[in-house]
Image: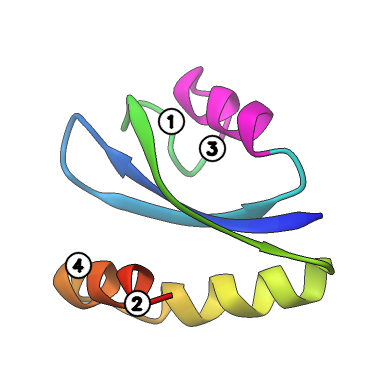
């Protein structure tokens, strides 16, 4: 199983969207500054996940969420999933 996830930075109220096969490990990597794109921007909390049977489905959904630039609209979209 693959999942698309949304993280929220407790430090600066920013969002990060990604996909992974192991959400627990990936969240730990984000919070331990092991991810270049989120380094020194956390701590991060997981606010949303959606599972997919293939990586390509998870990536497609990730890309669609990343196109949303308005935080309020992003939250509305993931709430309605």
Give 30 or 77, whichever is nearer the viewer: 77
Q: How many marks?
A: 4
Which residue in the protein does label 1 denote?
39
Q: Nearer the viewer, mark 3 or mark 2?
A: 2
Q: Residue at x 55, y 77 (%)?
A: 63
Q: In the picture, which quadrant includes the C terminus?
A: bottom left
Q: Which label number is shown at residue 36?
A: 3
Q: Is residue 34 left or right of residue 54?
A: left
Residue at the spot x=74%, y=77% of the render? 57
User: In whole angstroms, how far apart are the C-alphas of marks 1 and 3?
Assistant: 5 Å
Report if the CB atoms under discs 1 and 4 are less than 8 Å apart: no
Sooner in the amino-acid sequence: mark 1 or mark 4: 1
- Dot 2: what SS? loop
Quote the CA–CA distance across marks 1 and 2.
30 Å
First along the sequence among labels 3 and 2: 3
Q: Which mark is residue 71?
A: 4
Q: Label 1 vs label 4: CA separation?
A: 21 Å
Locate residue 80: give its quadrant. Answer: bottom left
Q: Which residues are magenta?
A: 23-35
Q: Earlier in the sequence, mark 3 or mark 4?
A: 3
Secondary structure beneath label 1:
loop
Q: Give the numbered dot on residue 80.
A: 2
Provide residue 77's location: percent of width, then percent of height: 32, 77
**CB contact under 8 Å: marks 3 and 4:** no
- Give the Cα separation between the discs numbered 3 and 2: 30 Å
First in sequence, mark 2 or 4: give its number: 4
């Amino acid at each position: 199983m693959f999942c698309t996830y949304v993280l929220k930075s407790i430090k600066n109220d920013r969002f990060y969207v990604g996909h992974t096969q192991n959400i627990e490990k990936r969240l730990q990597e984000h919070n331990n500054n092991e991810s270049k794109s989120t380094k020194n921007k956390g701590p991060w909390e997981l606010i949303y996940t959606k599972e997919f049977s293939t990586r390509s489905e998870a990536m497609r959904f990730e890309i669609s969420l990343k196109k949303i630039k308005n935080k309020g609209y992003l939250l509305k979209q993931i709430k309605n999933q």
